[in-house]
Image (cartoon, grey):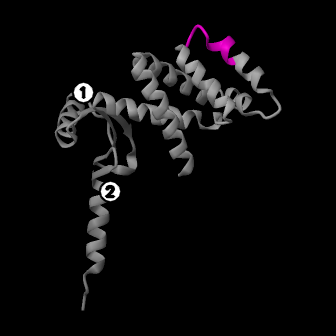
């Protein structure tokens, strides 16, 4: 929990700096790419976190790799993370930055789980309903899980809407077990 709060503070500082400098979209794109790179290549974060490698050597690598690819403010931000020994929070900071960006854009991601594929028309209708519920623009992230059996489960920010057949069966089972038979 503490690490999340720290990551949020760093993300908020980066967000405010990027917004105030007019580079918000560029920084958002860049931090997303860095997060993807770090998740794909674990050696990158391992190198940045290695205590035996001097900080200046790490900064030189970052400058060499990213000077022409990243917004200058983001590169300075990464150097700050190195100085403060917070590179272990890089992906958490990126996640928190993405949340701040979504709030800024009035966007919310809905994780939708169904037992079957949803075609574009079904996704559009679901998106419309979720936008009415949330009052924000909704981006649907769809995943298929056969365990759902039927229906839909939606994770919308801090809310779970479970209209799955699996849940309905569980509720029915629970209610039937409560009935006393003489």
Q: Is residue 80 left or right of residue 49?
A: left
Badge 2: few (under 14), some or many (20 or more) residues near its Cα, within 10 Å?
Answer: some
Left or right: where 157 falls relative to 94: left
- Residue 147, how many percent across, how many down? 39, 50
Give how far across and how far down residue 64 sits, in percent: 69, 11
Q: Quadrant of residue 177?
A: bottom left
The structure residue drawn at horizontal position 64% and vertical position 37%, both measured from the top left corner, is: 88
Compared with residue 140, is residue 115 higher up or lower down, i.e. above or below? below
* Mark 1 lies on residue: 120
Tell me where residue 85 appears, x and y as whole percent: 68, 36
From what the image shows, is residue 115 above or below residue 97?
below
Q: Is residue 116 above or below residue 119?
A: below
Q: Is residue 118 magenta?
A: no
Give percent across and percent down for residue 56. Answer: 76, 21
- Is residue 50 shown left or right of residue 3? right
Which sits earlier in the primary sequence, circle 1 or circle 2?
1
Which residue: 72% across, 33% down? 49
How far apart, in angstroms, are the residues tagged by discs 1 and 2?
24 Å
Q: Nearer the viewer, residue 38 or 141?
A: 38
Taking the view exactly as shown, the residue that stands out farthest to the bottom is 182
Q: Residue at x 35, y 31 (%)?
A: 102
Along the line of sight, which residue is nearer the eye, 99 or 2? 2
Mark 1: secondary structure:
helix
Which quadrant of the figure contains the C terminus? bottom left
Callout 2: SS: helix
Crowding near pointer 1: few (<14 within 10 Å), some, many (20+)?
Answer: few
Q: Which segment is the magenta one?
A: 62-70
What's the residue at 54%, 26% (across, down)?
Answer: 36
Residue that label 2 marks? 166
């Amino acid at each position: 929990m503490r690490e999340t709060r720290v990551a949020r503070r760093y993300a908020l500082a980066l967000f405010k700096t990027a917004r105030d400098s007019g580079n918000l979209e560029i920084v958002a794109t860049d931090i997303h790419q860095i997060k993807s790179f770090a998740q794909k290549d674990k050696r990158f974060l391992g190198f940045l976190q290695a205590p035996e490698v001097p900080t200046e050597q790490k900064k030189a690598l970052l400058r060499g790799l990213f000077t022409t690819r990243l917004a200058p403010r983001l590169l300075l931000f990464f150097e700050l993370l190195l100085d403060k020994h917070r590179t272990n929070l890089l992906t958490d900071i990126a996640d928190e930055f993405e949340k701040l960006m979504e709030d800024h854009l009035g966007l919310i991601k809905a994780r939708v789980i169904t037992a079957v594929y949803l075609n574009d028309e079904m996704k559009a209708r679901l998106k419309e309903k979720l936008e009415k519920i949330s009052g924000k623009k909704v981006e649907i992230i769809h995943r298929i899980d056969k365990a759902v059996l039927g229906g839909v489960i939606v994770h919308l920010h801090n809310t779970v809407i479970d209209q799955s057949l699996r849940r309905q069966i569980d509720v029915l089972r629970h209610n039937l077990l409560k009935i006393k038979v003489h």
